[in-house]
Image: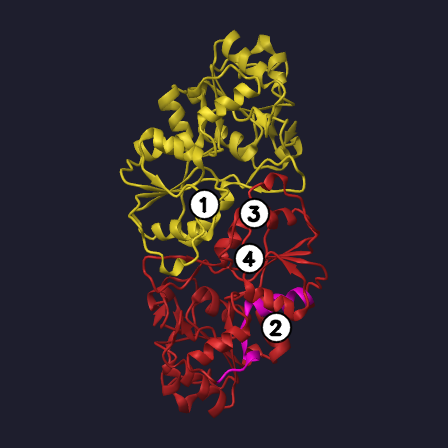
Chain colours: A yellow, B red
Amino acid sequence: MSCDGRVVKALDSKSNGIFPRSFHILGVIWNGESIIEGAAEALSLLKHRHGKKVCLVTNNSTKSPLDYLNKCEKLGIHILNEEEIVSSSTVAAYYLKHKLHVRNKVYVIGGPGLGKELDKIGIQHVGIGADHFEDYHSEERIFDVSAVIVGFDPHISYAKILKASSYLKNKDCLFVATNEDSCFPSTNPLLILPGAGSVLASVKVASGREPIVIGKPHRPILTYLKEKLGLDPSKTLMTGDTLATDIAFAKRHGLASMLVLSGNTTLEDVKNARTELSPDYYANSLKTLCELEGEI
Amino acid sequence: MSCDGRVVKALDSKSNGIFPRSFHILGVIWNGESIIEGAAEALSLLKHRHGKKVCLVTNNSTKSPLDYLNKCEKLGIHILNEEEIVSSSTVAAYYLKHKLHVRNKVYVIGGPGLGKELDKIGIQHVGIGADHFEDYHSEERIFDVSAVIVGFDPHISYAKILKASSYLKNKDCLFVATNEDSCFPSTNPLLILPGAGSVLASVKVASGREPIVIGKPHRPILTYLKEKLGLDPSKTLMTGDTLATDIAFAKRHGLASMLVLSGNTTLEDVKNARTELSPDYYANSLKTLCELEGEI
Protein backbone atom coordinates (compact mmCIF):
# COMPACT_ATOMS: atom_id res chain seq x y z
CA MET A 1 0.00 0.00 0.00
CA SER A 2 1.30 3.44 -0.87
CA CYS A 3 -0.03 6.76 0.33
CA ASP A 4 1.46 10.26 0.48
CA GLY A 5 4.83 8.96 -0.62
CA ARG A 6 4.84 6.46 2.25
CA VAL A 7 5.06 2.77 1.54
CA VAL A 8 3.69 0.27 4.01
CA LYS A 9 4.59 -3.23 2.87
CA ALA A 10 2.49 -6.30 3.33
CA LEU A 11 4.48 -8.95 5.11
CA ASP A 12 5.16 -11.74 2.62
CA SER A 13 7.86 -14.14 1.55
CA LYS A 14 9.69 -11.33 -0.23
CA SER A 15 10.01 -9.34 2.99
CA ASN A 16 13.61 -9.24 3.97
CA GLY A 17 16.08 -7.03 5.69
CA ILE A 18 13.77 -6.50 8.62
CA PHE A 19 13.42 -9.96 10.05
CA PRO A 20 16.96 -10.72 11.05
CA ARG A 21 16.19 -8.55 14.09
CA SER A 22 17.22 -10.42 17.18
CA PHE A 23 14.68 -8.91 19.62
CA HIS A 24 10.95 -9.09 19.05
CA ILE A 25 8.42 -7.14 21.10
CA LEU A 26 4.78 -8.06 20.91
CA GLY A 27 2.36 -5.29 21.83
CA VAL A 28 -0.64 -7.56 21.71
CA ILE A 29 -1.29 -11.28 22.14
CA TRP A 30 -4.87 -11.36 23.40
CA ASN A 31 -8.15 -9.55 23.00
CA GLY A 32 -10.02 -9.51 26.30
CA GLU A 33 -10.08 -13.13 27.41
CA SER A 34 -9.27 -14.69 24.00
CA ILE A 35 -5.81 -15.35 22.61
CA ILE A 36 -5.10 -13.77 19.21
CA GLU A 37 -4.76 -16.29 16.40
CA GLY A 38 -1.15 -17.26 15.85
CA ALA A 39 0.21 -15.61 19.02
CA ALA A 40 1.38 -18.79 20.74
CA GLU A 41 2.86 -20.21 17.54
CA ALA A 42 4.63 -16.94 16.69
CA LEU A 43 6.14 -16.69 20.19
CA SER A 44 7.30 -20.30 20.11
CA LEU A 45 8.80 -19.98 16.65
CA LEU A 46 10.65 -16.75 17.44
CA LYS A 47 11.96 -17.80 20.81
CA HIS A 48 12.60 -21.53 20.53
CA ARG A 49 13.28 -22.24 16.88
CA HIS A 50 15.12 -19.04 16.03
CA GLY A 51 16.56 -18.16 19.42
CA LYS A 52 15.33 -14.57 19.36
CA LYS A 53 14.78 -12.56 22.49
CA VAL A 54 11.05 -11.89 22.92
CA CYS A 55 8.88 -9.89 25.24
CA LEU A 56 5.32 -8.76 25.65
CA VAL A 57 4.90 -5.05 26.45
CA THR A 58 1.53 -3.79 27.67
CA ASN A 59 0.35 -0.33 28.72
CA ASN A 60 -2.29 -1.93 30.91
CA SER A 61 -1.34 -1.29 34.54
CA THR A 62 -4.17 -3.22 36.16
CA LYS A 63 -2.25 -6.49 36.49
CA SER A 64 1.27 -7.45 37.57
CA PRO A 65 3.53 -9.53 35.28
CA LEU A 66 2.75 -12.56 37.48
CA ASP A 67 -0.97 -12.00 36.92
CA TYR A 68 -0.28 -11.82 33.19
CA LEU A 69 1.83 -14.97 33.34
CA ASN A 70 -1.12 -16.77 34.93
CA LYS A 71 -3.38 -15.40 32.20
CA CYS A 72 -0.93 -16.70 29.56
CA GLU A 73 -0.93 -20.16 31.14
CA LYS A 74 -4.73 -20.16 31.19
CA LEU A 75 -4.83 -19.21 27.51
CA GLY A 76 -2.38 -21.99 26.60
CA ILE A 77 0.76 -19.86 26.22
CA HIS A 78 3.59 -21.57 28.09
CA ILE A 79 6.45 -19.78 26.38
CA LEU A 80 7.04 -16.58 28.35
CA ASN A 81 8.66 -16.12 31.74
CA GLU A 82 7.85 -13.32 34.19
CA GLU A 83 10.74 -11.09 33.06
CA GLU A 84 9.53 -11.26 29.47
CA ILE A 85 6.22 -9.62 30.42
CA VAL A 86 6.63 -5.88 30.83
CA SER A 87 3.67 -3.77 31.92
CA SER A 88 3.47 -0.03 32.55
CA SER A 89 2.97 -0.81 36.25
CA THR A 90 6.37 -2.58 36.50
CA VAL A 91 8.11 0.20 34.61
CA ALA A 92 6.35 2.91 36.64
CA ALA A 93 7.65 1.39 39.89
CA TYR A 94 11.16 1.02 38.40
CA TYR A 95 11.10 4.60 37.08
CA LEU A 96 9.91 6.08 40.39
CA LYS A 97 12.69 4.31 42.28
CA HIS A 98 15.67 4.39 39.91
CA LYS A 99 15.08 7.51 37.80
CA LEU A 100 13.10 9.84 40.06
CA HIS A 101 14.69 8.50 43.27
CA VAL A 102 11.40 8.65 45.17
CA ARG A 103 11.96 7.98 48.87
CA ASN A 104 8.67 8.93 50.53
CA LYS A 105 5.10 7.86 50.08
CA VAL A 106 3.41 7.84 46.71
CA TYR A 107 -0.29 8.63 46.27
CA VAL A 108 -1.78 6.13 43.83
CA ILE A 109 -4.86 6.40 41.68
CA GLY A 110 -4.74 2.88 40.32
CA GLY A 111 -5.43 -0.77 41.00
CA PRO A 112 -3.86 -3.62 42.97
CA GLY A 113 -1.58 -4.60 40.04
CA LEU A 114 0.21 -1.28 40.35
CA GLY A 115 0.27 -1.65 44.14
CA LYS A 116 2.01 -5.04 43.85
CA GLU A 117 4.77 -3.59 41.68
CA LEU A 118 5.35 -0.71 44.11
CA ASP A 119 5.44 -3.15 47.03
CA LYS A 120 7.91 -5.38 45.21
CA ILE A 121 10.36 -2.52 44.70
CA GLY A 122 9.86 -1.13 48.22
CA ILE A 123 7.94 2.07 47.55
CA GLN A 124 5.37 2.99 50.21
CA HIS A 125 2.01 4.01 48.83
CA VAL A 126 -1.57 4.91 49.72
CA GLY A 127 -4.77 5.37 47.75
CA ILE A 128 -5.64 1.99 46.24
CA GLY A 129 -9.27 0.98 46.72
CA ALA A 130 -12.52 2.89 47.13
CA ASP A 131 -12.55 6.46 48.51
CA HIS A 132 -15.81 8.36 48.39
CA PHE A 133 -15.43 10.80 51.29
CA GLU A 134 -18.17 13.41 51.28
CA ASP A 135 -16.90 16.20 53.46
CA TYR A 136 -14.05 17.19 51.21
CA HIS A 137 -14.13 20.80 52.35
CA SER A 138 -12.75 19.78 55.71
CA GLU A 139 -10.25 17.28 54.32
CA GLU A 140 -6.74 18.02 55.43
CA ARG A 141 -3.53 17.09 53.71
CA ILE A 142 -3.00 13.85 55.57
CA PHE A 143 0.68 13.42 54.79
CA ASP A 144 3.31 14.73 52.47
CA VAL A 145 3.64 12.66 49.35
CA SER A 146 6.62 12.86 47.06
CA ALA A 147 4.78 11.67 43.94
CA VAL A 148 1.31 11.13 42.55
CA ILE A 149 0.90 8.26 40.11
CA VAL A 150 -2.24 7.87 38.03
CA GLY A 151 -3.25 4.70 36.21
CA PHE A 152 -6.53 3.01 35.50
CA ASP A 153 -8.78 2.95 38.56
CA PRO A 154 -12.39 1.73 38.50
CA HIS A 155 -12.79 3.41 41.91
CA ILE A 156 -12.05 6.86 40.49
CA SER A 157 -13.93 9.41 42.63
CA TYR A 158 -14.08 13.09 43.46
CA ALA A 159 -12.11 12.42 46.63
CA LYS A 160 -9.28 10.87 44.63
CA ILE A 161 -9.13 13.65 42.02
CA LEU A 162 -9.20 16.25 44.81
CA LYS A 163 -6.41 14.56 46.76
CA ALA A 164 -4.20 13.97 43.71
CA SER A 165 -4.50 17.53 42.44
CA SER A 166 -4.08 19.00 45.94
CA TYR A 167 -0.82 17.07 46.44
CA LEU A 168 0.27 18.35 43.02
CA LYS A 169 -0.10 21.97 44.22
CA ASN A 170 3.33 21.32 45.71
CA LYS A 171 5.63 21.77 42.70
CA ASP A 172 8.14 19.35 44.24
CA CYS A 173 5.56 16.57 44.16
CA LEU A 174 6.24 14.48 41.04
CA PHE A 175 3.44 13.57 38.65
CA VAL A 176 3.63 10.23 36.84
CA ALA A 177 1.03 8.42 34.70
CA THR A 178 1.14 4.76 33.68
CA ASN A 179 -0.32 5.47 30.23
CA GLU A 180 -2.65 7.69 28.25
CA ASP A 181 -4.88 5.10 26.58
CA SER A 182 -8.35 6.64 26.36
CA CYS A 183 -10.24 3.31 26.40
CA PHE A 184 -9.90 -0.44 26.75
CA PRO A 185 -10.88 -2.60 23.79
CA SER A 186 -14.53 -3.55 24.33
CA THR A 187 -16.16 -6.71 23.08
CA ASN A 188 -19.59 -5.10 23.59
CA PRO A 189 -20.17 -2.66 20.72
CA LEU A 190 -22.52 -0.59 22.88
CA LEU A 191 -19.94 0.12 25.56
CA ILE A 192 -16.95 2.37 25.82
CA LEU A 193 -14.69 1.25 28.67
CA PRO A 194 -12.76 4.38 29.72
CA GLY A 195 -9.04 3.79 30.29
CA ALA A 196 -6.24 5.37 32.29
CA GLY A 197 -6.12 8.36 29.90
CA SER A 198 -9.68 9.29 30.85
CA VAL A 199 -8.94 9.11 34.59
CA LEU A 200 -5.70 11.02 34.04
CA ALA A 201 -7.44 13.86 32.14
CA SER A 202 -9.45 14.90 35.19
CA VAL A 203 -6.30 15.17 37.35
CA LYS A 204 -4.44 17.06 34.60
CA VAL A 205 -7.24 19.64 34.29
CA ALA A 206 -7.72 20.11 38.05
CA SER A 207 -4.00 20.35 38.84
CA GLY A 208 -2.96 22.23 35.71
CA ARG A 209 0.07 19.94 35.48
CA GLU A 210 1.44 17.55 32.85
CA PRO A 211 2.64 14.10 33.94
CA ILE A 212 5.64 12.03 32.95
CA VAL A 213 3.98 9.20 31.02
CA ILE A 214 5.49 5.71 31.35
CA GLY A 215 3.59 3.68 28.74
CA LYS A 216 4.00 3.36 24.98
CA PRO A 217 4.77 5.48 22.96
CA HIS A 218 6.86 7.27 25.62
CA ARG A 219 10.50 6.65 26.47
CA PRO A 220 10.46 5.12 30.00
CA ILE A 221 9.50 1.66 28.70
CA LEU A 222 12.37 1.79 26.20
CA THR A 223 14.81 2.75 28.95
CA TYR A 224 13.58 -0.15 31.08
CA LEU A 225 13.91 -2.64 28.21
CA LYS A 226 17.45 -1.44 27.52
CA GLU A 227 18.57 -1.59 31.13
CA LYS A 228 16.82 -4.76 32.23
CA LEU A 229 16.63 -6.85 29.04
CA GLY A 230 19.53 -5.48 26.99
CA LEU A 231 17.35 -4.24 24.14
CA ASP A 232 19.10 -2.60 21.17
CA PRO A 233 16.54 -0.58 19.17
CA SER A 234 18.36 -1.16 15.88
CA LYS A 235 18.01 -4.92 16.35
CA THR A 236 14.37 -4.93 17.47
CA LEU A 237 11.03 -5.42 15.76
CA MET A 238 7.89 -4.10 17.47
CA THR A 239 4.65 -5.82 16.52
CA GLY A 240 1.30 -4.47 17.67
CA ASP A 241 -2.25 -3.60 16.68
CA THR A 242 -2.44 0.06 17.73
CA LEU A 243 -0.94 2.96 15.79
CA ALA A 244 -0.89 5.55 18.59
CA THR A 245 0.93 3.30 21.06
CA ASP A 246 2.73 0.31 19.43
CA ILE A 247 3.69 1.80 16.07
CA ALA A 248 4.35 5.29 17.47
CA PHE A 249 6.63 3.72 20.09
CA ALA A 250 8.67 1.91 17.42
CA LYS A 251 8.90 4.90 15.08
CA ARG A 252 9.79 7.34 17.84
CA HIS A 253 12.62 5.22 19.23
CA GLY A 254 14.14 3.68 16.10
CA LEU A 255 12.65 0.16 16.23
CA ALA A 256 11.35 -1.57 13.11
CA SER A 257 7.57 -1.88 13.20
CA MET A 258 4.84 -4.21 12.04
CA LEU A 259 1.10 -3.60 12.40
CA VAL A 260 -1.19 -6.61 12.81
CA LEU A 261 -4.73 -6.02 11.59
CA SER A 262 -6.32 -8.40 14.07
CA GLY A 263 -7.37 -5.51 16.36
CA ASN A 264 -9.40 -2.39 15.65
CA THR A 265 -6.91 -0.82 13.23
CA THR A 266 -7.47 -1.04 9.46
CA LEU A 267 -5.30 -0.11 6.47
CA GLU A 268 -7.66 2.83 5.99
CA ASP A 269 -6.61 4.07 9.44
CA VAL A 270 -2.96 3.82 8.38
CA LYS A 271 -3.73 5.83 5.25
CA ASN A 272 -5.41 8.55 7.31
CA ALA A 273 -2.76 8.65 10.03
CA ARG A 274 0.20 10.97 10.29
CA THR A 275 3.48 9.73 8.74
CA GLU A 276 5.04 9.07 12.14
CA LEU A 277 2.34 6.45 12.74
CA SER A 278 3.00 4.47 9.54
CA PRO A 279 4.39 1.01 10.23
CA ASP A 280 7.14 -0.49 8.08
CA TYR A 281 5.07 -3.66 7.55
CA TYR A 282 1.58 -4.91 8.11
CA ALA A 283 0.08 -8.39 8.34
CA ASN A 284 -3.41 -9.72 8.84
CA SER A 285 -2.48 -11.60 11.98
CA LEU A 286 0.43 -12.94 13.99
CA LYS A 287 -0.13 -16.19 12.07
CA THR A 288 1.54 -14.56 9.08
CA LEU A 289 4.79 -14.55 11.04
CA CYS A 290 4.62 -18.33 11.27
CA GLU A 291 3.98 -18.78 7.56
CA LEU A 292 7.24 -16.98 6.84
CA GLU A 293 9.34 -19.21 9.00
CA GLY A 294 12.23 -19.31 6.58
CA GLU A 295 12.46 -15.54 6.42
CA ILE A 296 12.70 -14.51 10.03
CA MET B 1 -1.25 49.96 33.28
CA SER B 2 0.12 49.49 29.80
CA CYS B 3 1.61 46.35 28.32
CA ASP B 4 2.19 45.15 24.75
CA GLY B 5 0.39 48.16 23.36
CA ARG B 6 -2.66 47.33 25.44
CA VAL B 7 -3.99 49.79 27.97
CA VAL B 8 -5.97 48.60 30.95
CA LYS B 9 -7.32 51.57 32.85
CA ALA B 10 -7.80 51.80 36.56
CA LEU B 11 -11.34 52.74 37.35
CA ASP B 12 -11.33 56.28 38.75
CA SER B 13 -13.26 59.48 38.62
CA LYS B 14 -11.86 60.22 35.18
CA SER B 15 -13.34 57.02 33.78
CA ASN B 16 -16.06 57.91 31.38
CA GLY B 17 -17.66 56.68 28.24
CA ILE B 18 -18.03 53.21 29.59
CA PHE B 19 -20.37 53.74 32.52
CA PRO B 20 -23.47 55.01 30.78
CA ARG B 21 -24.07 51.32 29.94
CA SER B 22 -27.62 50.46 30.89
CA PHE B 23 -27.08 46.76 31.68
CA HIS B 24 -24.59 45.55 34.27
CA ILE B 25 -23.60 41.91 34.68
CA LEU B 26 -21.75 40.84 37.79
CA GLY B 27 -19.72 37.68 37.41
CA VAL B 28 -18.92 37.49 41.10
CA ILE B 29 -20.51 38.73 44.32
CA TRP B 30 -19.31 36.19 46.87
CA ASN B 31 -16.32 34.08 47.70
CA GLY B 32 -17.40 30.77 49.18
CA GLU B 33 -19.76 31.72 51.99
CA SER B 34 -18.66 35.39 52.30
CA ILE B 35 -20.03 38.32 50.37
CA ILE B 36 -17.44 40.37 48.45
CA GLU B 37 -16.89 43.84 49.87
CA GLY B 38 -19.09 46.39 48.13
CA ALA B 39 -21.25 43.87 46.26
CA ALA B 40 -24.54 44.72 47.96
CA GLU B 41 -23.89 48.46 47.75
CA ALA B 42 -22.88 48.27 44.08
CA LEU B 43 -25.98 46.28 43.18
CA SER B 44 -28.25 48.66 45.07
CA LEU B 45 -26.67 51.73 43.54
CA LEU B 46 -26.82 50.41 39.99
CA LYS B 47 -30.33 49.05 40.18
CA HIS B 48 -32.20 51.39 42.49
CA ARG B 49 -30.45 54.73 42.26
CA HIS B 50 -29.51 54.62 38.58
CA GLY B 51 -32.25 52.35 37.25
CA LYS B 52 -29.84 50.05 35.41
CA LYS B 53 -30.72 46.49 34.55
CA VAL B 54 -28.51 44.16 36.58
CA CYS B 55 -27.91 40.45 36.74
CA LEU B 56 -25.58 37.93 38.32
CA VAL B 57 -24.19 35.34 35.92
CA THR B 58 -22.48 32.25 37.35
CA ASN B 59 -20.92 29.22 35.68
CA ASN B 60 -21.58 27.21 38.81
CA SER B 61 -24.27 24.64 37.99
CA THR B 62 -24.60 23.11 41.44
CA LYS B 63 -27.42 25.37 42.60
CA SER B 64 -30.63 26.67 41.03
CA PRO B 65 -31.36 30.42 40.89
CA LEU B 66 -33.77 29.95 43.81
CA ASP B 67 -30.95 28.36 45.84
CA TYR B 68 -28.77 31.34 44.95
CA LEU B 69 -31.54 33.76 45.88
CA ASN B 70 -31.69 32.12 49.31
CA LYS B 71 -27.93 32.41 49.58
CA CYS B 72 -28.18 36.12 48.69
CA GLU B 73 -30.81 36.68 51.38
CA LYS B 74 -28.62 34.87 53.92
CA LEU B 75 -25.67 37.08 52.98
CA GLY B 76 -27.76 40.24 53.31
CA ILE B 77 -28.36 40.93 49.63
CA HIS B 78 -32.05 41.70 49.14
CA ILE B 79 -31.75 43.39 45.77
CA LEU B 80 -31.96 40.62 43.18
CA ASN B 81 -34.96 38.65 42.05
CA GLU B 82 -34.86 35.09 40.71
CA GLU B 83 -34.79 36.14 37.04
CA GLU B 84 -31.74 38.29 37.68
CA ILE B 85 -29.71 35.28 38.75
CA VAL B 86 -28.53 33.32 35.74
CA SER B 87 -26.58 30.09 36.26
CA SER B 88 -25.18 27.69 33.68
CA SER B 89 -27.73 25.12 34.90
CA THR B 90 -30.67 27.38 33.94
CA VAL B 91 -29.16 28.20 30.58
CA ALA B 92 -28.26 24.53 29.93
CA ALA B 93 -31.89 23.49 30.44
CA TYR B 94 -33.12 26.39 28.23
CA TYR B 95 -30.58 25.54 25.53
CA LEU B 96 -31.43 21.82 25.51
CA LYS B 97 -35.13 22.59 25.11
CA HIS B 98 -35.24 25.64 22.86
CA LYS B 99 -32.07 25.38 20.78
CA LEU B 100 -31.37 21.66 20.59
CA HIS B 101 -35.05 20.67 20.78
CA VAL B 102 -34.34 17.70 23.01
CA ARG B 103 -37.44 15.56 23.44
CA ASN B 104 -36.21 12.35 25.07
CA LYS B 105 -34.32 11.59 28.22
CA VAL B 106 -31.06 13.31 29.08
CA TYR B 107 -28.24 11.55 30.94
CA VAL B 108 -26.87 13.91 33.58
CA ILE B 109 -23.49 13.95 35.27
CA GLY B 110 -24.30 16.76 37.68
CA GLY B 111 -26.00 17.74 40.89
CA PRO B 112 -29.54 18.44 42.11
CA GLY B 113 -29.34 22.13 41.05
CA LEU B 114 -29.09 21.08 37.43
CA GLY B 115 -31.83 18.49 37.97
CA LYS B 116 -34.21 21.18 39.29
CA GLU B 117 -33.70 23.33 36.20
CA LEU B 118 -34.35 20.37 33.87
CA ASP B 119 -37.48 19.47 35.86
CA LYS B 120 -38.72 23.05 35.71
CA ILE B 121 -38.49 23.13 31.91
CA GLY B 122 -39.95 19.62 31.51
CA ILE B 123 -36.91 17.64 30.38
CA GLN B 124 -36.77 14.04 31.63
CA HIS B 125 -33.43 13.01 33.02
CA VAL B 126 -31.51 10.27 34.82
CA GLY B 127 -28.10 10.02 36.46
CA ILE B 128 -28.13 12.43 39.42
CA GLY B 129 -26.80 10.91 42.64
CA ALA B 130 -24.30 8.16 43.44
CA ASP B 131 -23.58 5.38 40.93
CA HIS B 132 -20.73 3.02 41.71
CA PHE B 133 -21.79 -0.17 39.89
CA GLU B 134 -18.98 -2.69 39.80
CA ASP B 135 -19.90 -5.13 37.07
CA TYR B 136 -19.63 -2.64 34.24
CA HIS B 137 -18.68 -5.32 31.71
CA SER B 138 -22.21 -6.66 31.79
CA GLU B 139 -23.88 -3.24 31.88
CA GLU B 140 -26.36 -2.82 29.04
CA ARG B 141 -27.51 0.40 27.42
CA ILE B 142 -30.55 0.85 29.63
CA PHE B 143 -32.37 3.36 27.44
CA ASP B 144 -31.78 5.62 24.52
CA VAL B 145 -30.78 9.08 25.59
CA SER B 146 -30.87 12.04 23.25
CA ALA B 147 -28.25 14.07 25.11
CA VAL B 148 -25.54 13.78 27.73
CA ILE B 149 -24.97 16.82 29.91
CA VAL B 150 -21.91 17.11 32.13
CA GLY B 151 -21.55 19.57 35.00
CA PHE B 152 -19.93 19.43 38.40
CA ASP B 153 -20.69 16.18 40.19
CA PRO B 154 -19.11 15.17 43.51
CA HIS B 155 -20.40 11.64 42.81
CA ILE B 156 -18.29 11.30 39.67
CA SER B 157 -17.49 7.61 39.21
CA TYR B 158 -16.26 5.10 36.67
CA ALA B 159 -19.84 3.99 36.09
CA LYS B 160 -20.86 7.54 35.18
CA ILE B 161 -17.93 8.14 32.81
CA LEU B 162 -18.57 4.75 31.18
CA LYS B 163 -22.28 5.44 30.71
CA ALA B 164 -21.81 8.99 29.42
CA SER B 165 -19.16 8.01 26.89
CA SER B 166 -21.08 4.90 25.81
CA TYR B 167 -24.19 6.98 25.09
CA LEU B 168 -21.97 9.37 23.13
CA LYS B 169 -20.90 6.50 20.82
CA ASN B 170 -24.20 7.30 19.12
CA LYS B 171 -23.33 10.34 16.99
CA ASP B 172 -26.93 11.57 17.22
CA CYS B 173 -26.63 11.83 20.99
CA LEU B 174 -25.89 15.48 21.82
CA PHE B 175 -23.05 16.42 24.18
CA VAL B 176 -23.47 19.49 26.36
CA ALA B 177 -21.35 20.79 29.26
CA THR B 178 -22.40 23.41 31.79
CA ASN B 179 -18.90 24.93 31.98
CA GLU B 180 -15.20 24.20 31.72
CA ASP B 181 -13.95 25.72 35.00
CA SER B 182 -11.08 23.52 36.15
CA CYS B 183 -11.52 24.29 39.89
CA PHE B 184 -13.67 26.06 42.46
CA PRO B 185 -12.09 28.87 44.46
CA SER B 186 -10.76 27.27 47.64
CA THR B 187 -10.41 29.01 50.98
CA ASN B 188 -8.03 26.26 52.14
CA PRO B 189 -4.65 26.90 50.48
CA LEU B 190 -3.79 23.20 50.73
CA LEU B 191 -6.76 22.05 48.69
CA ILE B 192 -7.65 22.12 45.04
CA LEU B 193 -11.39 21.61 44.58
CA PRO B 194 -11.79 20.17 41.08
CA GLY B 195 -14.61 21.74 39.06
CA ALA B 196 -16.88 20.74 36.17
CA GLY B 197 -13.98 21.07 33.70
CA SER B 198 -12.12 18.29 35.47
CA VAL B 199 -15.14 15.96 35.43
CA LEU B 200 -15.78 16.88 31.79
CA ALA B 201 -12.20 16.08 30.72
CA SER B 202 -12.60 12.39 31.54
CA VAL B 203 -15.76 12.12 29.40
CA LYS B 204 -14.15 14.04 26.54
CA VAL B 205 -11.12 11.71 26.48
CA ALA B 206 -13.14 8.49 26.78
CA SER B 207 -15.75 9.50 24.19
CA GLY B 208 -13.39 11.33 21.83
CA ARG B 209 -16.05 14.04 21.47
CA GLU B 210 -16.18 17.79 22.09
CA PRO B 211 -19.20 19.25 23.92
CA ILE B 212 -21.23 22.38 23.36
CA VAL B 213 -20.24 24.46 26.41
CA ILE B 214 -22.94 26.64 27.99
CA GLY B 215 -21.00 28.72 30.54
CA LYS B 216 -18.84 31.82 30.20
CA PRO B 217 -16.99 32.60 27.95
CA HIS B 218 -19.18 30.72 25.46
CA ARG B 219 -22.17 32.07 23.54
CA PRO B 220 -25.20 30.21 24.99
CA ILE B 221 -25.35 32.46 28.08
CA LEU B 222 -25.29 35.55 25.87
CA THR B 223 -28.13 34.16 23.74
CA TYR B 224 -30.16 33.47 26.89
CA LEU B 225 -29.56 36.98 28.26
CA LYS B 226 -30.62 38.51 24.96
CA GLU B 227 -33.77 36.42 24.62
CA LYS B 228 -34.92 36.39 28.22
CA LEU B 229 -33.62 39.69 29.62
CA GLY B 230 -33.29 41.86 26.51
CA LEU B 231 -29.55 42.34 26.83
CA ASP B 232 -27.85 44.51 24.20
CA PRO B 233 -24.08 43.80 24.26
CA SER B 234 -23.21 47.35 23.20
CA LYS B 235 -25.03 48.71 26.25
CA THR B 236 -23.63 46.21 28.76
CA LEU B 237 -20.75 46.19 31.22
CA MET B 238 -19.46 42.84 32.48
CA THR B 239 -17.71 42.90 35.84
CA GLY B 240 -15.90 39.85 37.17
CA ASP B 241 -12.78 38.49 38.83
CA THR B 242 -11.72 35.82 36.35
CA LEU B 243 -9.96 36.49 33.04
CA ALA B 244 -10.71 33.17 31.31
CA THR B 245 -14.45 33.31 31.97
CA ASP B 246 -15.75 36.81 32.84
CA ILE B 247 -13.40 38.98 30.82
CA ALA B 248 -13.13 36.53 27.91
CA PHE B 249 -16.95 36.45 27.77
CA ALA B 250 -17.15 40.24 27.52
CA LYS B 251 -14.37 40.59 24.96
CA ARG B 252 -15.66 37.76 22.79
CA HIS B 253 -19.20 39.08 22.59
CA GLY B 254 -18.70 42.85 22.45
CA LEU B 255 -19.49 43.83 26.05
CA ALA B 256 -17.42 46.38 27.96
CA SER B 257 -15.38 44.73 30.71
CA MET B 258 -14.08 45.45 34.17
CA LEU B 259 -11.86 43.19 36.24
CA VAL B 260 -12.16 43.30 40.03
CA LEU B 261 -9.00 42.29 41.85
CA SER B 262 -10.82 40.92 44.89
CA GLY B 263 -10.43 37.33 43.64
CA ASN B 264 -7.36 35.35 42.62
CA THR B 265 -6.47 37.50 39.60
CA THR B 266 -3.71 40.10 39.82
CA LEU B 267 -2.55 42.84 37.45
CA GLU B 268 0.49 40.64 36.82
CA ASP B 269 -1.87 37.98 35.46
CA VAL B 270 -3.41 40.57 33.13
CA LYS B 271 0.04 41.50 31.89
CA ASN B 272 0.88 37.86 31.19
CA ALA B 273 -2.46 37.05 29.57
CA ARG B 274 -3.30 37.04 25.88
CA THR B 275 -4.75 40.32 24.50
CA GLU B 276 -8.25 38.86 24.22
CA LEU B 277 -8.26 38.48 28.01
CA SER B 278 -7.38 42.13 28.76
CA PRO B 279 -10.22 44.00 30.46
CA ASP B 280 -11.07 47.59 29.56
CA TYR B 281 -10.95 48.60 33.24
CA TYR B 282 -9.84 47.20 36.54
CA ALA B 283 -10.69 48.08 40.13
CA ASN B 284 -9.60 46.74 43.50
CA SER B 285 -13.11 45.80 44.50
CA LEU B 286 -16.77 46.34 43.73
CA LYS B 287 -16.63 49.11 46.33
CA THR B 288 -14.85 51.25 43.77
CA LEU B 289 -18.07 51.33 41.76
CA CYS B 290 -19.82 52.95 44.73
CA GLU B 291 -17.16 55.60 45.15
CA LEU B 292 -17.79 56.73 41.59
CA GLU B 293 -21.46 57.21 42.05
CA GLY B 294 -21.58 60.36 40.01
CA GLU B 295 -19.93 58.76 37.02
CA ILE B 296 -22.02 55.70 36.39
Residue B151 sits in quarter: bottom right
Q: What chain is tagged by disc 1?
A: A
Tell me where residue A111 appears, x and y as whole percent: 45, 38
Residue A239 sits in quarter: top right
- Closer to us: mark 2 or mark 4? 4
Secondary structure at badge 1 equals loop
Badge 2 and badge 4 in a common chain? yes
CA gap, disc 2 to disc 4? 28 Å
- The local crowd at label 3, few if under 14, some if 14 to 19, many if 20 or more residues have their Cα within 10 Å, is many
Between B2 and B30, the one lying in front of the other is: B30
Please tell me whether residue B190 belongs to the stretch shown in magenta: no
Q: Are marks 4 and 3 in contact (CB under 8 Å)?
A: no
Label 3 belongs to which residue? B159
Label 4 belongs to which residue? B129
Label 2 belongs to which residue? B224
The amino acid type, in three-letter code, at marker 3 is Ala
Secondary structure at badge 3 equals helix
The amino acid type, in three-letter code, at marker 1 is Ala
Please give the range of residues in magenta: B79-97
